[in-house]
Amino acid sequence: MAKTEQPPLYCMRRGDTLIGEMEADREWIRQQPYDQRIKVALSTGRSPSKLRFYWSFLGKVVKATHCAPSTETLHDVVKLHTGFVTPVMVKGFTVAVPKSISFASMTESEFNTFLETAIEWIAQTYGITPEMAFAEEAA
């Protein structure tokens, strides 16, 4: 029979101890035999609110400037112009392929750097800052 993959387990650090974040996480830990060695791959989670902010901001820039046909296209343009690419050789030519900003592809710290760079590039290129883009919502 095929082994089913365990969904990710999320923990919070309390002193020197990792504690399951949700009850389901803590329950899974309780089900493990006492003194059993458990392999843990550490990574910090991405802030979903920052990711939502980024995509919302891109949408407002596209709506205000018509600079791209979609937020996804503007996202690729931002990655190309901020150097967030992987150089690939194609028939003797180097082509810049935009990298992924997925949770699995970068740390929260790397995403923060990308976000700051993206906001700065958009402000310089299109003259729109987050404060301007979200001003009407605040009013």
Image (cartoon, grey):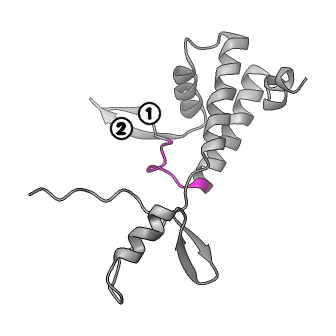
Classify 10 Å Cα crowding around label 1: few (below 14), some (14-19), many (20 and above): some
* Quarter occupied by residue 45: bottom right
Taking 139 as reference, is 47 left or right? left
* Amino acid of disc 1: Ala
| Tag 2–tag 1 contact (CB < 8 Å) | yes
Query: Can you say whether 117 is above or below 122 in the image?
Result: below
Mark 2 and mark 1: span between their CA atoms? Answer: 6 Å
Q: State the residue in front, 47 or 113.
A: 47
Main secondary structure found in the magenta portion: loop
- Please provide percent x and percent y for residue 79: 55, 34
Q: Does residue 106 belong to the magenta stretch?
A: yes
Q: Position of residue 1 (x, y in %)?
A: 8, 57
Q: Is residue 33 magenta?
A: no
- Magenta region: 101-108
Q: Quadrant of residue 80?
A: top right
Residue at horizontal 65 percent and vertical 49 percent from the top: 112
* 42 shown above or below 50: below
Tell me, yes or no, if residue 21 can be seen here.
yes
Q: Which residue is mark 1?
A: 96
Q: Residues within 10 Å of mark 2 (few under 14, many from 20)?
A: few
Residue 24 point in image, percent of width and height = 45, 62
Label tally: 2
Residue identified by numbered label 2: 88
> Residue visible at 32% across and 85% down?
36
Residue 98 locus on image (x, y percent): 46, 34
| Residue 61: mark in rendering | none
**95, 35: nearer the viewer:** 35
Mark 2 or mark 1: name the one nearer the start of the chain: 2
Q: Residue furthest left?
A: 1
